[in-house]
Amino acid sequence: MAKRLIITADDMGYNVERNRGIIECFQRGAITNSSLMVNGIAAADAAHLALKYGLPTGLHFNITEGAPVNKSNKYTTITDKEGFFLGKQGLRQAVLDKIIDCQEVREEMNAQIKRYEELIGSKPVYVDGHQHAHIIPGLSEVFAEVLEEHHIQATRVPYEKNLKEVSWLGEPWEKILFTFSDDAARARPIFKAHNIWESDLFFGLATMGCNMSIERLQTGITRAFDSVPNLINQTVTCELMSHPGFACQGDGGCGEGPDDFSQSSDREYEKSVLESEDMAQFYKKNGIMLMSYHQCLESLK
């Protein structure tokens, strides 16, 4: 079995320190691509660095944090009275309460794809969702339709087969992560119906910040690949979600200022784990090829 691993660094564009940390990670062979937040205050800096150093990027569609990209139409259901998105839990509750106008979601998604194209010079080959908003039941259909309309080929489906084996999380995080994984399982057939590619496997829900370690990454990646039959002529692709970078020292965020996670040492800690020689040797020993979304999609042609 040929093993391919996509290592995505999320949230590029949030602040300049994060951008710099992600580029360092890429230069050291620790990540393969990054998802760009185009409503982040450092999005232009992120795009400049990605193009300068050849970092493959996709769009990190953000409909939960900060201010919208679309300024021409004032939203009434996906933002609050101050014009900011409703937050991770606020959006989910609004969807459950059936007060979200999906046309607003569509408009904002189109605006973010357009902004990405302005920054990078081409449409993204893949789009995922900040805080996994793209897999919320009721929104995943709109997300898939817009991707297909733009001929965008791939997305992330954060379904973890072995999430139940995670022992270091307590409430409320355990419940939240199982909700993400369950939502992903429901979204999968919707994305498939719209001809959107996803990796065969996914890992990383429970290894954010201080919860990441070399041992947990190696065990989780090994278990992921071991969960599928070892067929000689089969190629299996797994995505590892990560959040490396340097701590925000000044301005950051998407219009409301930086959050606690961005200002902590957790992202630099993730960076050190990903860049470790132990991880490099692990990939080599286990015959794991590091590839970007772009390379995986090229191989399908």
Image: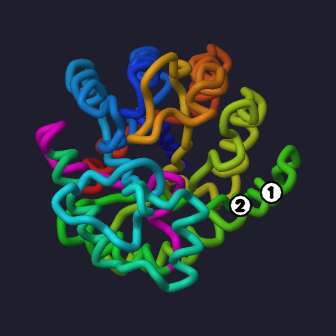
Image position of 8 with respect to 20: above or below: below
Residue most extreme to the front: 81
Q: Nearer the viewer, residue 244 or 104?
A: 104
Q: Left of 168 or right of it: where is 249? A: left
Quadrant containing the C terminus is bottom left
Where residue 172 is drawn, which disc sits there? 1
Q: Is residue 28 magenta?
A: no
User: Is residue 144 placed above or below 32 in the rendered structure?
Assistant: below
How many labels were placed on the picture? 2
Which numbered marker is on residue 176?
2
Report if residue 195 is visible in the image. Answer: no
136 drawn magenta? yes
Q: Position of 191 compared to 145: left or right?
A: right
> For the point 62% across and 16% down, which residue is it?
276
Q: Residue at x 72, y 49 (%)?
A: 223
Binning the other alpha carbons within 10 Å of mark 2 as few (below 14), some (14 to 19) or many (20 upward) gives few
- Give the image location of residue 282, x and y in percent: 65, 26
Q: Residue furthest bottom?
A: 98
Estimate the x, y position of residue 257 in percent, counting from the top left: 47, 35
- Residue 13 horizontal/vertical position (percent): 36, 33
Observer-nearest of 126 and 129: 129
